[in-house]
Amino acid sequence: MAPERHRSPSGATAAGRPRPRLDQPQPRRTRLLPEWDAEAFGRLSEQIARFLGTGRFIVWMTVVISIWLVWNIAAPRYLRFDPYPFIFLTLMLSLQASYAAPLILLSQNRQSDRDRVNLEQDRRQNERSIADTEYLTREIATLRAGLGEVATRDWMRSELQDFVKDLEERRRPDGPAVFPAERTRGRDVDDR
């Protein structure tokens, strides 16, 4: 029999190795990078990208740039914060463009994901519609085949008219008798 190992209250064996407990979740690991909700960030980027694609954004951007230029040209020299080559303005526009491009790409990726899901749902719906249509087509074909075997009103009318003509021909004195004379001799063998 193997020697029994003694456990400490923390779950470590006598050999000194701690064994993980399977009945409890592991403690959270610390992360160096901040965590964020990808869905919320995606929604925010779509809102920003939608705003960047509107006429309102272009108007506001034109107003801000115009004020910037007028201020730095017409204001007294000591109040100007970005003189003529407008380097700070160029830097701000480059910064805005460097953030706008990835946000637009992110919103396009999310839109393509939504489009892919919608296309898949449309494909499944089309498959169900085709299957339903094929089923209904088979059912209609079965009903048509079944109706071919059912006596219709016109067929019954034509059969009855033929039967009446046949009876009228038999009733004529020159034609054969309609009903043959009955036998009066005792019982038939089949009358049991």
Image (spheres, grey):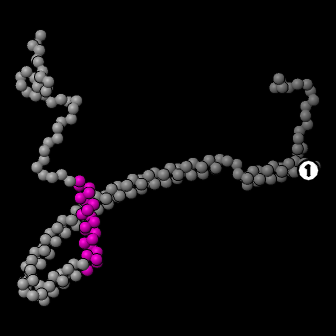
57 lies above or below 108: below
Work out whether residue 60 or residue 129 is closer to the camera in this orientation and state it.
60
Work out whether residue 89 or residue 186 is closer to the camera in this orientation and state it.
89
Q: What are the residue bounds of the magenta stretch?
A: 37-59
Q: Residues within 10 Å of mark 1 (few under 14, many from 20)?
A: few
Mark 1: secondary structure: loop
The prevailing secondary structure element of the residues shown in magenta is helix
Q: Is residue 44 left or right of residue 95?
A: right
Q: Quadrant of residue 38?
A: bottom left
Determine the residue located farthest toward the top in the rendered image: 1
Q: Position of residue 9 (x, y in %)?
A: 14, 24
Q: Position of residue 94 (x, y in %)?
A: 12, 73
Q: Quadrant of residue 192?
A: top right
Magenta-span inclusion, residue 147: no
Q: Is residue 80 left or right of residue 137?
A: left
Q: Please name the residue that numbered disc 1 is placed on.
A: 172
Magenta-span inclusion, residue 44: yes
Question: Which residue is found at the position 52% from the left and 50% from the top?
Answer: 138
Q: Is residue 52 left or right of residue 170?
A: left
Q: Quadrant of residue 63?
A: bottom left
Amino acid under label 1?
Arg
If the image is split into quadrants, where does the N terminus sit? top left
Question: Which residue is found at the position 13% from the left and 44% from the top?
Answer: 30
Work out whether residue 73 or residue 154 is closer to the camera in this orientation and state it.
73
43 lies above or below 171: below
177 lies above or below 55: above
Work out whether residue 5 or residue 187 is closer to the camera in this orientation and state it.
5
Question: Which residue is found at the position 20% from the left and 53% from the top?
Answer: 36
Q: Position of residue 132 (x, y in %)?
A: 48, 51
27 lies above or below 133: above
Question: Which residue is found at the position 22% from the left and 29% from the top?
Answer: 23
